[in-house]
Amino acid sequence: MNDQKLRVAFIEPVGGHGGMDYYDVGLCAALGNEGVDVTLYTCDETAVNPQHPFKTSYTYQSIYGSDPTWRRGLRYLYGTLKTLYHAKANHAQISHFHFFHIGPLEFCNIFLAWLIRLKVIVTAHDIESFVSQLSSPVLTRWVYRLATHVITHNALSKQQLATIAQIPERKITIIPHGNYLHALRPLPSLQAARVRLNLPQDANILLFFGQIKEVKGLDILLQAMPALLQQVPNTYLIIAGRVWKDDFAKYEKIIQQNQIEPYCRTYIHYIPNEEVATFYAAADLVVLPYRKIYQSGVLLMAMSYCKPVLASDLDAMKQIIEHDQTGFLFPNGSVAALSATLVRLLMDKERLYQIARLGFEYIQKEHGWDTIGQQTIACYQQAMAHAKNGR
């Protein structure tokens, strides 16, 4: 056994249940390619190709579904105990957790890892849950105090998390979210995708993809549709994703009030991995009218699929999109500006295709997993060095 080899327990229970497997595989493979002995601990809904340069252990069994919450919670805790026992037996030095929110189960994970003296790295994927206090403020502060080091995906997230969790910014490292090029299924042709989704071949197709929640601004896009249809009548909007802490009935009401039912195609459920490519292939433009966001996986996926993106001009979006260079931006919350921008873009398809290509080149270069893997290893090494100087 090479005692100098870095061993990492990559603990991420969501996995294929919620689309986190794209990220998990990208980063674990990058770490493995750099010589790290990494094991992904995840749920039984995750499918991982055994050819990847890392190990996978499905320690979280039946933690999702319709069983009572208490029963699934106990299974989750049992999965964590199995995970940490296996990690310790495998001589892991680092435990790397990934959180979208923090509640009692997440706190238990961190506390138990800390208790058995693993170095704890936390990647905070969704700062919004902390800002809006969907996460417990007390548990959030304790989790980040126990963590050896924290990773966020951009400067805005770092600043917000430092304030909310009351931790020094020197404890937080910015590492970008990687692209999805490693995980994409081949795109069907535009024609085949539109046949599959029963869409006109000659139409303009807009795509709103991903979780449907209030901060995503779907209502802004729906309110922009009537003015758009007056000038570009052959336009359809695909809405694909499941609702999260929101009520789709209010969006249906907007659709009915504006009499745009014939132009909206809704798929209000989780879109399985094998169906995702069809939605992107059918689209001319992906629209992200978010009111507030700290990181968008949909943005990165759209650009990885070489699809042009129109997004609200939030700081997190502007860190990836340069207007009219790698994508398009409109003033946050402005229905009129969104309508006008959509009209302009759909009337210049050639420009859409040019920007899509530039966006793809950007995401390939600036969000490549090899670089992200190296940055993550540097973060691990920093955590190890910190440990040598005292806990």
Image: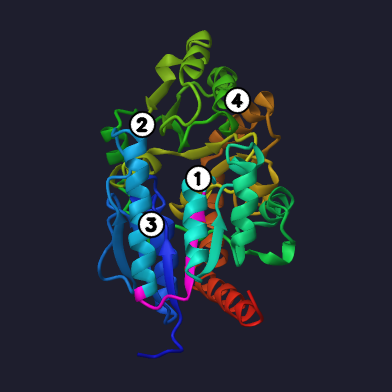
- Is 196 drawn above or below residue 45 in the view shown? above
Mark 2 or 4: in front is 2
Query: Residue 104 has which mark?
Result: 1
Which residue is pictured at 43% across the width and 15% down the height? 261
Q: CA distance from mark 2 to mark 4?
A: 21 Å
Residue on which the image places disc 4: 220
Q: CA distance from mark 1 to mark 3?
A: 13 Å
Which residue is pictured at 57% across the width and 65% down the height? 366
Quarter of the figure with residue 42? bottom left
Dot 2 lies on which element? loop
- Is 11 drawn above or below residue 2 in the view shown? above
- Is 68 drawn above or below residue 322 in the view shown? above
Query: Residue 331 has which mark?
Result: none
Residue type beneath disc 3: Thr
Residue type beneath disc 2: His
Dot 1 lies on which element? helix
Magenta segment, which residues? Answer: 89-99
